[in-house]
């Protein structure tokens, strides 16, 4: 029986499965968000030492550190997290937000990421149905969550996440999952070059760098997935949301306006919104402007 047929028989069970899947993926995203930047820093440090032919006086650390090893531990007492203490959301509530060994507080961000991932997973499937579009949109949604929080923490959009999704968007354009190949290719090129041009102009005028190369690649990613037609909408939404959040941070938290604010989370949010409602938003605007 097809997935569509199963949905017709018992949609509640399938939606529950989506929630559980999203929560499980969210637990893994917490690992990616914390460990991937550390892994990249270690790799870059090793590359710099090799390039400069600098030999460390310290004994090399041969302890493996990747997304699978070592096992998760409490950051305060190094207590190894047991399987029943790592159930998404549930374990946090059961432990009352504290380590079972030293009773130190566990950051609420961990269950929040799991919960948000679960809700967004359910929403994507509910909105798009059990379609090829939903099957493609889910991993992109998960990737955008990881990218947003890594950029927020480290002002970094790792190529190891962005570039594969960019290529995937171009491949998906071949069967026309979201857009056609011509629109995707132009979108990828226009997305990158448009922000790159703004970056170069801003640096020429001010001597400062207004954004990073990761932002160019992320914008190119959305051009590849959705086509060049959606780029103006994405940049408009991300700029408005970024400006509003920046003003709020300055007013309410006294944030120094000279401290850079990562643009990746706003770009990711705008791209995700455009993926789900871009056509309706564009049509509403054209109707309002009397062009439709």
Image (tube, helix red, strand yellow):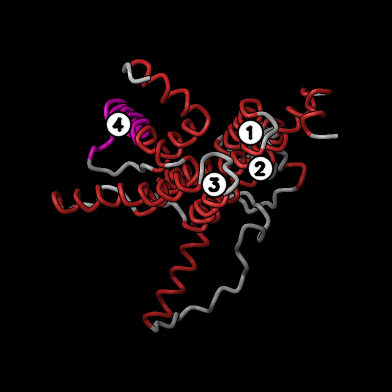
Q: Residue 108's x, y, as percent?
A: 56, 34
Q: Residue 262's x, y, as percent?
A: 36, 43
- Residue at x-position 28% and y-position 35%: 255
Question: For the C terminus, which image quadrant?
Answer: top left
- SS category of the residue bearing label 1: helix
Q: CA distance from mark 2 to mark 1?
A: 9 Å
- Residue at x-position 42% and y-position 22%: 283
Residue, disc 2:
25
Sequence-wise first label, 3 or 2: 2
Q: CA distance from mark 1 to mark 4?
A: 28 Å
Residue, disc 4:
243
Magenta: main secondary structure: helix
Badge 2: how crowded within 10 Å, few (<14), some, or many (20+)? some
Labelled disc at residue 121:
1
Q: Does the CB distance between marks 3 and 4 fall below 8 Å?
A: no
Q: Does the CB distance between marks 2 and 1 fall below 8 Å?
A: yes
Labelled disc at residue 173:
3
Residue 255 lies in magenta, yes or no? yes
Q: Residue 279's x, y, as percent?
A: 47, 27
Q: Nearer the viewer, residue 103 or 97?
A: 97
Q: Does the CB distance between marks 1 and 4 fall below 8 Å?
A: no
The residue most toward the left is 205
Q: Does the CB distance between marks 2 and 4 fall below 8 Å?
A: no
Q: CA distance from mark 3 to mark 2?
A: 26 Å
Badge 1: how crowded within 10 Å, few (<14), some, or many (20+)? many
Q: Residue 252's x, y, as percent?
A: 31, 25
């Amino acid at each position: 029986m097809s997935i569509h047929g199963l949905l017709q028989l018992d949609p509640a069970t399938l939606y529950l499965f989506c929630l559980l899947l999203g929560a499980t993926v969210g637990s893994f995203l917490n690992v990616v968000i914390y460990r991937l930047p550390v892994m990249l820093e270690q790799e870059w440090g090793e590359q710099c030492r090799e390039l400069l032919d600098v030999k460390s006086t310290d004994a090399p650390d041969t302890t493996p550190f990747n997304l699978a090893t070592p096992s998760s531990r409490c950051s305060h007492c190094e207590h190894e997290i047991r399987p029943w203490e790592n159930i998404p959301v549930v374990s946090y509530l059961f432990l009352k937000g504290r380590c079972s060994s030293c009773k130190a507080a566990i950051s609420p961000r961990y269950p929040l990421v799991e919960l948000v991932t679960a809700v967004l997973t359910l929403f994507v499937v509910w909105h798009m149905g059990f379609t090829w579009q939903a099957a493609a949109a889910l991993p992109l949604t998960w990737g955008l969550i990881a990218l947003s929080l890594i950029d927020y923490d480290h002002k970094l959009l790792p190529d190891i996440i962005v570039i594969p999704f960019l290529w995937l968007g171009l491949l998906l354009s071949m069967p026309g999952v979201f857009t056609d190949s011509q629109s995707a290719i132009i979108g990828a090129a226009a997305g990158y070059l448009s922000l790159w041009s703004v970056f170069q102009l801003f640096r020429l005028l001010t001597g400062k760098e207004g954004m990073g190369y990761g932002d160019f690649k992320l914008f190119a990613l959305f051009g590849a997935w959705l086509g060049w037609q959606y780029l103006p909408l994405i940049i408009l939404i991300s700029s408005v949301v970024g400006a509003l959040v920046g003003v709020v941070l300055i007013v309410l938290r006294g944030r120094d306006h000279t401290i850079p604010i990562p643009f990746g989370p706003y770009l990711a949010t705008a791209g995700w919104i455009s993926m789900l409602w871009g056509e309706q938003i564009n049509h509403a605007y054209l109707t309002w402007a009397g062009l439709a």
